[in-house]
Amino acid sequence: MSAPIQNILAVAGRVRMRSAYLQMLDLLAGLDARGRSVSVVCATLPAETLMREISFPVTTWSAVGSGRSGIFRPVTFQDFYDRLKPQVIHVHGTGLRHSGRRFLNSISAPVVFTPYVTATETREIRRIQRRAARVIALNEHMREALVNHVGIPRERLRVVPPGVDVNQYDLLLPGIGEREAVIGAAAPLEPGRGQSTFLQAARLLLNSGREAQFIIGGDGPAERALRREAAKLGVEKRVTFVTRLSNYRSVISAMDVRPAPAGNLSYAALQAMAMGKAVVATIAGDVPELLEEGRTGLMVPKDDPPALAHVLMQLLDRPEAAREMGLAARRAVSERFNMDLLVENTLRVYEEAVLETGD
């Protein structure tokens, strides 16, 4: 029987304002709050994330032996590792590149790996998973992709669904019918994230005679194009862009309905559910695993503005149903996607990894 897991080193490449990395920071905060010693080493940590309250130490690669040139100094890395004495290394994402992989190969602690993207990072996933005793998939859909498209043995994979601390979220049910509805999308402003579908649905909803305000929250290279599209559709006076965010929580709290039209139900959508918002998501990826159609949320086909507009109209026309959906969504998060379960399931994977490697 191995000793309880107390010392954890989280390793990442460039930490970005993405749901996966915000979930990573919350998981580490959850471990820290439950008495575990948590440290992070990453390539970069953006200024926006520094606005969060981070209670554990964060070190950049350059501070422990690898600069932008990729020069690797083994003695420095070894000193860093010896000082921390982690029982387990948890790699988050695929952005380690050469220096990060060299670091993993230089140490003896067991490795757990959580990839976030399976479709575009197959080669990098294969490289990192060779060093991992266990690989964490965020949902069953991802596990099947890692088995069938990446080739990771099923027995090394464990599904650990995301989670949030519901106690940190006020219940803010939709105020539809009491005031003008606010419908918002919160995600990085990048092609393929669904904001264009959202804007087209907004135009259709306004054409139907319903009244609403719309929010697009996030940052990214597509912002200018999306602003142009809003103007072209004639909805620019109804759409507010909220940028330079340290997280999506503040902008989500202002919404009544949170569509997630990009194909996956992100961490931001779980935050919306925890607040009791009505969530609309695309029928793809992990969505059917996280949403119960008609009870905790509604689902629509991908890239289908008329379908999204139709569902949004239904919510505006039935404010009581929207509030009931918000309450059910919060209960689902509290029971199935909470921080206690996330920490407990993650620690179980750590223990398996330690037992398998014999450390």
Image (cartoon, rainbow, N blue to C red):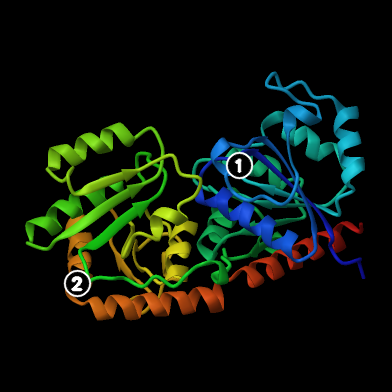
Three-letter residue code for mark 1: Leu
Q: In this view, does 324 lie to the left or right of 164?
A: left
State the separation of the CA atoms marked 1 and 2.
40 Å
What residue appears at the point 51 percent right and 51 percent down from the top-left corner? 19
Q: In this view, does 134 lie to the left or right of 225?
A: right
Identity of the residue furthest to the front in this view:
179
Corner quadrant of residue 346: bottom right
Q: Residues within 10 Å of mark 1 (few under 14, many from 20)?
A: few
The residue positioned 87% from the left and 41% from the top of the image is 81
Determine which residue is flagged by label 2: 314
Rendering quarter of residue 350? bottom right
Q: Is residue 152 left or right of residue 81?
A: left
Which of the two residues, 47 or 131, is positioned nearer the viewer here?
47
**Can you tell which mark lies on residue 50?**
1
Which residue is nearer to you in this view: 318 or 246? 246
Which of the 4 image quadrants contains residue 153? bottom right
Q: In this view, does 114 lie to the left or right of 41?
A: left
Residue 34 rendering spot, x and y as whole percentages? 75, 66
Residue 348: in sight, yes or no?
Answer: yes
In the displayed structure, 209 sits above or below 298; it is above
First in sequence, mark 1 or 2: give its number: 1
Where, quadrant-wise, is the C terminus in this rendering? bottom right
